Amino acid sequence: RMLARLAPLLARHAPRPRAFRAPSYNRRGVLTRASRDTSSMQKVTFGDAQIPGYECGDKSSPAVIVIQEWWGVTENIQRQALKLSEDGGFRCIVPDLYKGKLGVDVEEAHHLMTSLDWPNAKDELVECAKYLRASGSPKVGVVGFCMGGALALIAAQHADDVVCAAPFYGTPDPAICQTDKITKPVQAHFGELDNLAGFSDPDAAKKLLANLRAAGSDCELHMYPNVGHAFMNDLPAPYTDWDAREKTQGFPRFDSAQVEVAWMRLLEFFRKHLA
């Protein structure tokens, strides 16, 4: 299965979890520390199973479900939700699919992702969208990164209350999500140099686009030059600089210009479809 092939690839290539940083750089091209205090994220539960999550924004605003990478609900993913909320005016929620567990290193993240009950995660995303609609949001969209990108497409197919989806560098196993049946608007983001074959490389991105077009989706595919997998991550940790990360992992250097373009497109997409 695709997940079984993906996990070892991520174990070799993925950087450790990191916090979101505003685009500020030193002379070596390494980002410096910045703001966005995640203490403003409110812990919530939703659904009959009392699924945990973190929420921000006005409950009457259009909502965006922000789905984690394989690390879990890190400070990074919470700051991305805050950015969407503060810059776009959206209500955002990060459902905690790992129930408080975090992948503090590659081995544990690998274990958490491969142990995830994907059909149950699908059901929890359905419940999350229902919760947002029932508690005040007129429309709901979804965005996800890596594993979360695949889950964003799963939510687009299976959650009636989700009206649009924005997956970043991730495609789902066809056993749980048939992308050629997704008719909702989709804006997909992939790096031209992504090397995770069958999951987020250019061929996987082009196959996703073909499937969405076959379904009649109002879809966009944005391929970003000079960047690879996890290009939205903003620090080279655990390495000291981007050159060291590239030498060890094969990932290109962080490109702030491409990331800024991606954020601009994402905000415009949600403003269009959640208005």
Image: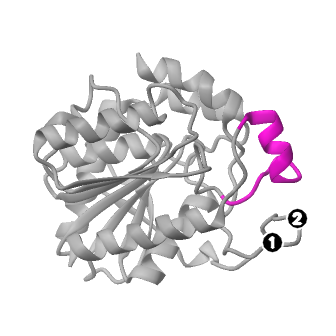
Helix, strand or loop status at disc 1: loop
- Number of dots carrying numbers: 2
Circle 2 residue: 28
34 displayed left or right of 206:
right
Asked if labels 2 and 1 touch by Cβ distance under 8 angstroms, the answer is no
Q: Position of residue 12 (x, y in %)?
A: 70, 28
Colour scheme of the picture: one colour
Which segment is the magenta one? 234-250
Position of 135 compared to 231: left or right?
left
Quarter of the image for residue 211 reads top left
Residue drawn at x 51%, y 74% is 82
Q: Which residue is drawn at 38% across and 73% down?
A: 267
Quarter of the rendering occupied by the N terminus: top left
State the image coordinates of residue 155 (x, y, percent, origin top left): 26, 47
Say few, some or many: other residues with alpha carbon within 10 Å of mark 2 (under 14 / 14 to 19 / 20 or more). Answer: few
Vertical position of residue 104 compared to residue 111: above or below: below
Q: Of the numbered discs in the image, which one, if any, rests on residue 32? A: 1
Residue 231, image x and y in percent? 60, 52
Specify the amino acid type for callout 1: Thr
Q: Which of 120 and 157 is in front in this view?
A: 157
Left of 250 or right of it: where is 214? left
